[in-house]
Image (spheres, rainbow, N blue to C red):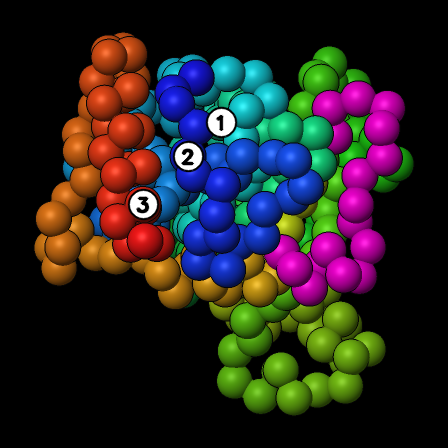
Amino acid sequence: MPASAPRRERHGYPLRSGAVSVGLNIGAGHTYIPGFVNVDISERAEVTLDLSKDRLPFDDNSVDTVVSIHTLEHVPDYLHALGEIHRVLRHDGALLLKLPYVTLTEAHMINPYHLHNFSERSFDFFDPERLKGSAGEESRVAFRKVFVRYTYLGSFGMLPGPLRVWARRHLFNVVRQFDVGLVAIKDDRPVDAGRERSHELQSTLRKLASSRVPYEDSPAPHVASSRDHGMIVRGWDRVQRRTRMRES
């Protein structure tokens, strides 16, 4: 694993006790997040790889937070990507996602570049206390859902809670996108999926999403290949130096 980043808060992202904060931004083709390692198939990213088949160049249990904004729906083998994310996350580490909602028609279901559909139930299939194993799959990938937050279309968001639930389940074009926060389960130890953790992860996702920088507006981060470990280490060192300069 490349050298550790400085033990400080970044973008309001809280460090857990005794841990060094390492964060990955998965799907950094158009924007990057300063202070995170930015990964994409695009050569503009710091680490360039194919999320559908390549291995993330990080050690097992070495990452605290992974954020991915409107990316998994584009990855042909998103189960491979999810498996790699789970591998590198520490136990109880966070996976923060923004995804198009399954029943959005005009901007999602007809989009030829959207290969998968997601809803609030999609990740229940990775929770041992919910639907994991119900499809007869053999996988160690396990996550627990901590929060779901919806972006409603039109006046649907003003409906009472039970009517919003009914509309999501029975109508099209009610929700444009949704945010979901998951925590990785790596062993038999408990994970923190309580109310305070929910608020923490929602706040973290909002701050990370708003901190994205378009490449055309700022110098692009260092370009590296997933097959060139030396370049990855140098790219990681440059991320650290930029972060230390901003936080000094």
Task: Using the image, determine if residue 61 lies above or below residue 38.
Answer: above
Residue at the location (76% across, 61% down)?
A: 196
Measured from the top left, where is residue 208 in percent x and y?
44, 57
Mark 3 to mark 1 CA distance (whole Å): 30 Å
Disc 2 versus disc 1: distance between alpha carbons?
24 Å
Decide which of tag 2 and tag 1 comes sooner along the chain: 2
Horizontally, is 210 left or right of 152 in the view? left
> The disc labelled 3 sits on which kind of residue?
Arg
> Which residue position holds label 1?
81
Q: Residues within 10 Å of mark 1 (few under 14, many from 20)?
A: many
Magenta span of residues: 184-201
**Magenta-drawn stretch contains 190:** yes
Does residue 32 appear in this view? no
Task: Judge from the rendering whether residue 126 lies leftward or rightward of residue 30; answer left or right.
Answer: right
Write down the residue under mark 2: 5
The amino acid type found where label 1 is placed reads: Ala
Numbered disc in front, either 2 or 1: 2
Q: Which residue is mark 3?
A: 244
Identified by mark 2, the residue type is Ala
